[in-house]
């Protein structure tokens, strides 16, 4: 028997999960959207919606993910505040993750470990209520709440089994991790394996670029909601742009990201100070990594962006139950849930090694 490890990254745009299933390590992706459920009259759609319906304690049933996106009012959003993680909608997303983990679990396990993250700026104040929330739905699981950028660190120093890649070097190396997510961009420095408090912090995330794109489109006469702008950034396409003759979406997205990238570079410089030149690497992760990395690499040649090596099982739970194409389940946006998964595996591996040495 073994543990089922769940790396759970509930972002303000999408929920990404890396977890153990009967088919091996799988990935899950669904929009971070939830809305109170209601009766659907068309039987086929009602049956599909049932798969993405969960019960929230004392609040009733909620649609989540794609069903929430399709069925809810277009004004639905994930909220741009730290306290969103305490909302009923966030709790519904946790409940759905627990449902997925339970239904896909290996046949014989002795326990579960769930690893979830928070932005650096709200970690201290929100880690206990978030831990309580996750424990409510992952009954009996060991739950670890960690600062979000720690995921990048564990992508760097461990493999998927949780084993240290270069144990002799890890204790001597120093790394900065920059995680550009939807809501925040988070920064930490690990100095020879030790967290540097004064070099950690948070700034605005990809949502700022989405707002910039929304304003740019509005100036051209197109009123597009924020969710559509976020999707346009992610997929590099926007059907509504057909209404604008000569409009170049790629250029618009680049222009929308420019002030955000500049702010991230300056904030990192301010937080890291002279420590920058003692770093072995600056590691860029998160959904906005592809936009942020070139600027960091140009300024600091030792910046790097980890490659995601995941291969989704073709006959796995996700492709059969949720209908998500395997090609969508890899890339920079999954490095956070991957890092959380490796963190959980590392804790189990360390416990095994410690017991073996006793």
Image (cartoon, grey):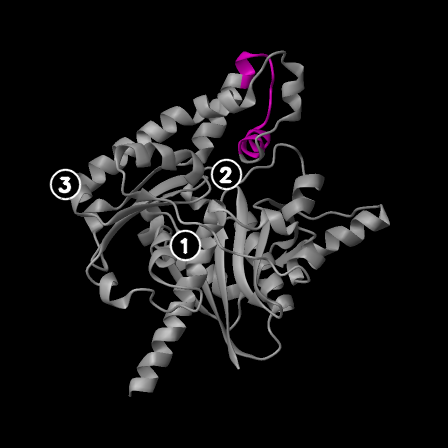
| CA separation in Å, label 2 and label 3 | 36 Å
- For this view, does 242 lie left or right of residue 258? right
Looking at the image, which is closer to me, 176 or 308? Answer: 308
- In reply to whether residue 223 is colored magenta, the answer given is yes
Q: Which label was assigned to residue 79? A: 2
Q: Which SS class for mark 1?
A: strand
Which tag, 1 or 2, sits closer to the chain's start? 2
Residue, disc 1: 117
Q: Residues within 10 Å of mark 2 (few under 14, many from 20)?
A: some
Stretch of the chain drawn in magenta: 217-233
Question: Foreground mark, 2 or 3?
Answer: 3
Is residue 146 in view? yes
Q: Earlier in the sequence, mark 1 or mark 3?
A: 1
The structure residue drawn at horizontal position 70% and vertical position 58%, both measured from the top left corner, is 321
Mark linked to residue 261: none
Badge 3: how crowded within 10 Å, few (<14), some, or many (20+)? few
Give the number of the mark in front: 1 or 3.
3
């Amino acid at each position: 028997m073994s543990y089922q490890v769940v790396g759970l990254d509930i972002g303000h745009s999408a929920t990404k999960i890396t977890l153990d299933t009967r088919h091996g390590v799988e990935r899950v992706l669904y929009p971070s959207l939830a809305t109170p459920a209601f009766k659907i009259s068309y039987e086929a759609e009602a049956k599909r919606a049932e798969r993405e319906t969960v019960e929230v304690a004392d609040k009733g049933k909620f649609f989540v993910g794609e069903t929430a996106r399709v069925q809810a009012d277009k004004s639905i959003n994930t909220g741009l505040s730290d306290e969103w993680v305490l909302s009923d909608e966030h709790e519904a997303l946790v409940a759905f993750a627990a449902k997925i983990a339970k239904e896909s679990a290996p046949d014989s396990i002795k326990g579960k470990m769930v690893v979830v993250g928070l932005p650096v700026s709200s970690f201290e104040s929100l880690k206990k209520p978030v831990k309580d929330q996750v424990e409510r739905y992952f009954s009996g699981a060991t739950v670890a709440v960690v600062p979000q950028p720690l995921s990048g660190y564990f992508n760097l120093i461990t493999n998927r089994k949780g084993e240290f890649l270069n144990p002799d070097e890890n204790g001597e190396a120093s790394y900065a991790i920059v995680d550009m997510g939807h809501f925040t961009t988070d920064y930490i420095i690990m100095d020879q394996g030790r967290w540097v408090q004064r070099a950690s912090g948070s700034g605005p995330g990809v949502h700022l670029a989405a707002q910039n794109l929304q304003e740019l489109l509005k100036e051209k006469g197109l009123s597009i909601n924020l969710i559509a702008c976020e999707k346009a950034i992610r997929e590099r396409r926007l059907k509504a742009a057909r209404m604008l003759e000569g409009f170049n979406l790629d250029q618009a997205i680049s222009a929308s990201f420019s002030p955000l990238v500049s702010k991230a570079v300056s904030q990192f410089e301010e937080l890291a100070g002279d420590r920058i030149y003692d770093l072995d690497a600056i590691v860029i992760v998160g959904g906005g990594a592809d936009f942020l990395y070139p600027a960091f690499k140009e300024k600091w040649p030792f910046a790097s962006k980890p490659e995601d090596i995941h291969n989704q099982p073709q006959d796995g739970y996700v492709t059969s139950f949720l209908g998500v194409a395997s090609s969508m389940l890899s890339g920079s946006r999954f490095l956070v849930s991957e890092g959380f998964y490796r963190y959980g595996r590392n804790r189990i591996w360390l416990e095994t090694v410690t017991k073996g040495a006793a």
